[in-house]
Amino acid sequence: MKGESIMTELSQAAVERIIKKGGAERISADATETLAILMEEYGIFLAKEAKKMSDHAGRKTLRGSDIQIAAEIFK
Amino acid sequence: MKGESIMTELSQAAVERIIKKGGAERISADATETLAILMEEYGIFLAKEAKKMSDHAGRKTLRGSDIQIAAEIFK
């Protein structure tokens, strides 16, 4: 599928823009795919930990502060 | 801008799907925005470190293996 990453939720175009922000100009397709997978894994990990925080607080809605606390713990 | 994150490259819809993979069902808008920012920061960080790896190898093109090594170092 052109322009879309097959295995992840993130678009190839978005991940390419992020790699360019990191300073690279020439980027192989597998670099984009690899970073997309790693970014999604990181996101799912933080979301799971944040869900524990909102459960613990007795809330049903995940808040930004749950994500923030999860990120601070695993920094 | 509805449906799009203002501050990051990642779409709100993609980040919401990632949060749902983490188990949350109800998600506040600021949770999505917070995770999008953290995921992008992580991506830029890894891309910068990967760029150092490709520079060190005397290559002009960033490869998936550069990203992979960067991720292993900072695991």
Image (tube, coloured by chain):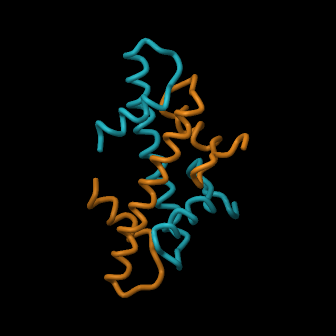
Chain colours: A cyan, B orange
B13 sits to left or right of A15: right
* Residue A8 percent coordinates (x, y): 56, 50
Count every numbered label the image shows and give the total.
0
B20 sits to left or right of A74: right
* Residue A6 percent coordinates (x, y): 61, 55
Of residue A8 and residue A73, the one placed in the foreground of this image is A73
Q: Quadrant of residue A67?
A: top left
x 38%, y 23%: residue: A53
- Quarter holding the N terminus of chain B is top right
Q: Is residue A19 above or below residue A57?
A: below
x 48%, y 32%: residue: A64
Of residue A60 and residue A48, the one placed in the foreground of this image is A60
* Residue A47 percent coordinates (x, y): 45, 34
Q: Is residue A31 above or below residue A73?
A: below
x 55%, y 40%: residue: B33
Residue found farthest to the right: B2
* Residue B75 percent coordinates (x, y): 28, 53
Of residue A56 and residue B34, the one placed in the foreground of this image is B34
x 46%, y 73%: residue: A23
Residue found farthest to the bottom: B58
Residue found farthest to the top: A58
